[in-house]
Amino acid sequence: MRGGFGALAYGIGWLSGTPPGEALSTIVTGSRTAAAGAGVQSITGAGFVPRAAIAIGSGTSGSALVASWGLLDDASAERVTVLSVTLVTDAANLIHISDGVNAMTAVAVLTADGLDLTWSKGAAGIDAIFSILFLA
C-alpha cells in the first residue's frame, strides 16, 4: 500500500471529520486529592475538539489499589470499576475510584479543548490519579 500506516491513519482522520493534518488523539494526565473534595476540574490540552474520551483512574485505600476505566462520547459516559475482584458498571461517572466506602467520582462533559470533571466525594475520599485519551 502506498504511504503505509501513516496514510491509513490520515485517511481515517479525514473520513471521521478531522481535517487533514490535524491531531487524531492525545493523552492528558491529572489528579484529584481527597482534600480537594467535590467541585469542577477542567482538563485541557487536547489541542482539538474531542468527540470521545477514554479514562483510566486509580487510587490507594489502605493497602488496596482501586481502579476504574471510563468511556465517554458526546452523548454519554460509561465506566467500569474494579472493586476488589468485582466489576461494577454504571452510566453516569467517567471516573469512579472507590473502596466501597470512601470514594472520588467524576461526571464528565466534553469541552472545546478537553473536558470538565464534576467531582463528588464519598466519606473520606481517595486521592485519585488518572490519564485521559482524547479522540477527535
Image (tube, helix red, strand yellow):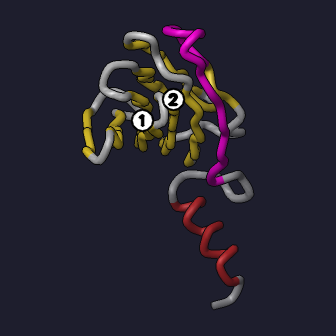
Q: Which residue is nearer to you in this view: 40 or 86?
A: 86
State which quadrant residue 101 falls in.
top left
Image point (61%, 31%), residue name: 114
* Left or right of 69, for residue 57: right
Q: Are marks 2 and 1 in contact (CB under 8 Å)?
A: yes
Q: Which residue is nearer to you in this view: 127 or 71?
A: 127
The secondary structure type at the circle numbered 2 is strand
**Is residue 35 a member of the stretch shown in magenta?**
yes
What amino acid does circle 1 point to? Asp
Q: Is residue 23 above or below residue 118?
A: below
- What is the span of residues highlighted in magenta in the rendered image? 24-41
What amino acid does circle 2 point to? Leu
Image point (71%, 34%), residue name: 45
Mark 1 crowd level (few <14, some 14–19, many ≥20, 10 Å Cα): few
Query: For the image shown, how many numbered marks are present on the structure?
Result: 2
Which of marks 1 and 2 precedes in the sequence? 1
Image point (69%, 52%), residue name: 23
In three-dimensional space, the C-alpha distance between marks 2 and 1, rounded to whole angstroms, equals 7 Å
Q: Which residue is nearer to you in this view: 56 or 47?
A: 56
Label 2 sits on residue: 110
